[in-house]
Amino acid sequence: MDTVLRDKFIDLWEKYFGNAELPITFYYSDGDSGAEWAEKPKGWSCIICDLAKVRKGTSHVYNGERITCGGGKRYLGYTDKLRPGFEYFLSCGNENMEGERYLRTPEHVKEFLKYQQRLPVGGKNLVFKRWDKLEEHDNPEVAIFFATPDVLSGLFTLANFDQTEPNSTFTPFGSGCASIIHYPYLETMNERQRAVIGMFDPSARPCIPGNTLTFAVPMRKFETMVSYMEESFLITPTWTAIRKRLT
């Protein structure tokens, strides 16, 4: 991790976004990178709820044993298996289970699954650290902002600053963890990287404040965004008016 970039962004973030929450980061690693091992849940657990601790400054590391949500385990690259009858679980249900009704029919679910890719992480550990907790030995792959509408507006516009094609961000359908981990990680492998706006999953939203969405961006694109901050709209009176609401 470039600690000069780390400190530069902290200063610029405070300058233009006030007391808005710093992003958290993640990367896959063979070790624990000095982070605390997350507790092994005794039952079902949602990683989005667990990340509240990371957002407050505690660095955590996970592996497949510490992810008990079937969807989370799959979206984070620890399995390619699905629960029996998943097509009914995600849609209308059947005589054996209540459906979440996120897609209309089991057939819709089957078609949706054809677009899914498994993350090529090979059983590595998953390290989460808040931006200001990163050290030289860290290698963050994605920065994740938990953002209010005003903050999201700034991030979205900054992500488009050097683009001529309008879709430099996208909002794929999926779980909360898919929107901040799965899809952004896949973007790190693309030449043209996009940011992911997410946390629309009703099942994950109880874990975050009601006025919050997420903005997850691969590090290469994020570094470019930081380099443009002081020549972008952030230095204009337009943003100054919004900045006053972020104190």
Image (cartoon, helix red, strand yellow):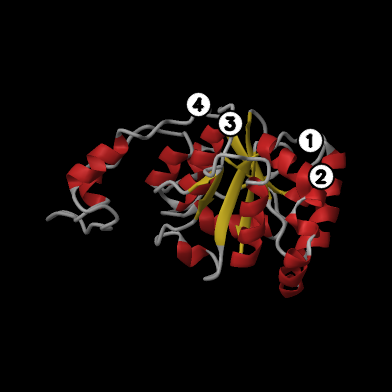
To which residue does mark 4 refer? Answer: 120
To which residue does mark 1 refer? Answer: 1
The Cα–Cα distance between marks 2 and 4, rounded to whole angstroms, is: 27 Å
Q: Residue at x 23, y 39 (%)?
A: 110
Query: In front: mark 3 or mark 4?
Result: 3
Residue 34: x, y in percent?
A: 74, 40
Q: State the residue lying farthest toward the left.
A: 95
The Cα–Cα distance between marks 2 and 3, rounded to whole angstroms, is: 23 Å
The residue closer to the viewer here, 239 or 169, is 239
Disc 3, SS: loop
Task: Please indicate whether residue 144 sits to the left or right of residue 228 in the image.
Answer: left
The residue closer to the viewer here, 9 or 209, is 9
The residue closer to the viewer here, 78 or 188, is 188
To which residue does mark 2 refer? Answer: 6
Residue 189: x, y in percent?
A: 56, 27
Give above or below for 66 relative to 120. Answer: below
- Decide which of tag 2 and tag 1 comes sooner along the chain: 1
